[in-house]
Amino acid sequence: MFGKILGFLDRILSFFEEWTLFITVLVALISLFVNVFLRYAFNYTLAWSEELVREVIIYTTLIGCSAAVKNRSMIKIDASVQLFPKFKVPLTFFSNSVVLIFSVFIFYYGWGMAALQVQTHQKTIIMQIPLVYIFSILPLMGAMMFIRIIQVMYQDVNELRTKKSLG
């Protein structure tokens, strides 16, 4: 039952990650291309294009954290695992636990920062995008990372059970 729920959440999150990252990067590339073309062809620049690219970089970095957890491509030091293979399972569990705690902190403090932006009504300089939209990516990232790390931990536990039952 728990595995089915995680599988359903995986499909939803994968769809969301892939399409929103694709669309945002595509929009940023098009705006940047148009800006470069206008700069060299007509000696005119779009000020909002660079701000849009900056916001897309923020978005893709934060949402990409969730995809990185899913693909197990988070930065980690694996030299200790190679030196002491017996500690692979406890170190993996420790690493996953740290990411789990980190995701809770990002959700909690990101929520607080987004709430603060609602109160102050701040906007970006050129495009006048309310900063609450940008800061709301933080709790979204925290929630997505939390779900992803639970999925990874569940897969690890199932692999350990399979190895123990076979061996």
Image (cartoon, helix red, strand yellow):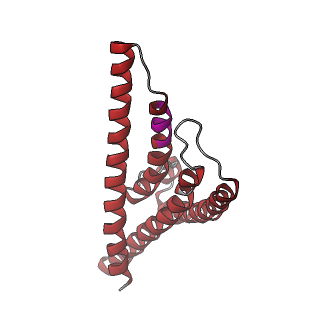
Above-or-below relation of 136 to 90: above
Q: Is residue 123 left or right of residue 93?
A: right
Q: Is residue 103 left or right of residue 16?
A: right
Q: Is residue 112 left or right of residue 57?
A: right
- Please tell me which residue lies in front, 143 or 74: 143
| Magenta span main SS | helix
On whether residue 52 falls in the magenta region, the answer is yes
Seen at 47% across and 40% down, the residue is 57
Whether residue 89 appears in this view of the structure is no
On whether residue 161 falls in the magenta region, the answer is no
- Give the magenta part as a residue range: 50-55
**How far from the left and from the top, in percent, is residue 53?**
45, 36
**How far from the left and from the top, in percent, is residue 90?**
53, 65
Whether residue 47 appears in this view of the structure is yes
**How far from the left and from the top, in percent, is residue 124?**
58, 41
- The image quadrant where one finds the C terminus is bottom left
Q: How many marks?
A: 0
- Please tell me which residue lies in front, 82 or 146: 146
Seen at 45% across and 70% down, the residue is 153
**How far from the left and from the top, in percent, is residue 72?**
41, 56
Seen at 55% across and 65% down, the residue is 100
- The image quadrant where one finds the N terminus is bottom left
